[in-house]
Image (cartoon, coloured by chain):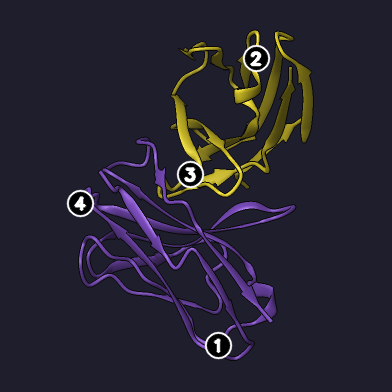
Amino acid sequence: DAGITQSPRYKITETGRQVTLMCHQTWSHSYMFWYRQDLGHGLRLIYYSAAADITDKGEVPDGYVVSRSKTENFPLTLESATRSQTSVYFCATRTGPGNQPQHFGDGTRLSIL
Amino acid sequence: EDQVTQSPEALRLQEGESSSLNCSYTVSGLRGLFWYRQDPGKGPEFLFTLYSAGEEKEKERLKATLTKKESFLHITAPKPEDSATYLCAVLNQAGTALIFGKGTTLSVSS
């Protein structure tokens, strides 16, 4: 039971480069989320998706792009990476309504030099 | 504005020394308060959901309680394997996403 798989687990890139973080789920949960976790800020929502082809902004969406053409995949793209986007990125899923718990992947640690 | 504040930021306990972690929140019409455990290098792991004041849930040495303004995570006779960061979150007013606190890092020594 793989659940949520995030790839890569670690990534180092340079400012100005485009980078895509992948998230794949095996549960067919409707909702998927992207968070970033930084010291002093906790987890903050970047984007979320209620279903395939339906996405919406979270608290900190600037500089990020998402797509969801298939239920099981929810990639996050940094179009032109900046140092402020160095962070740990977590993907999460949820089966249905908001009062159901979210389940998280193990994260991608991204460093932008 | 929806907000979650956790205290203390860090807590050191001896094995067997019980204590409580606090999560205070401001949100109109609470629809769910969630507790997670996070180990280093891992994603948050779901522990409990609480929906209404007075509700309590237990799992092994952990017990979560909820009032109208705050939640407590009580840890009874902790063991070193309980060492982790504990995160509290509430569902936002729109019901679309979780608002997380910054967490409490618990260290239990033998």
- Measured Cα–Cα span from mark 1 to mark 4: 31 Å
Q: Where residue B17 appears, x then y in whole percent?
A: 74, 9
- Tag 1 and tag 2, C-beta contact below 8 Å: no
**Quadrant where the C terminus of chain B lies?**
top right
A80 sits left or right of A77 in the view: right
Q: Which residue is drawn at 30% across and 47% down?
A: A3
Q: What type is the residue that disc 2 sits on?
A: Pro
Q: Name the residue under label 3.
A: B93
| SS label for mark 4 | loop
Number of residues whose C-alpha sits closer than 10 Å to that of mark 1, classed few (under 14), some (14–19) or many (20 or more) = some
- In percent of the image, x 55 and y 15: which residue is there? B62
Q: In this figure, which residue is indicated by the disc labeled 2? A: B78
Residue linked to disc 4: A28
Q: Can you tell which of label 2 and label 4 is closer to the viewer?
A: 2
* Chain of the residue displaying label 4: A
For the residues tagged 1 and 4, is the chain the same? yes
According to the picture, the residue beneath numbered tag 1 turns out to be A80
Q: Callout 3: helix, strand or loop? A: loop
Does residue B30 appear in the picture of this structure?
A: no
Nearest-to-viewer mark from 3 and 1: 1
Q: Which residue lies furthest to the front in this view?
A: B110
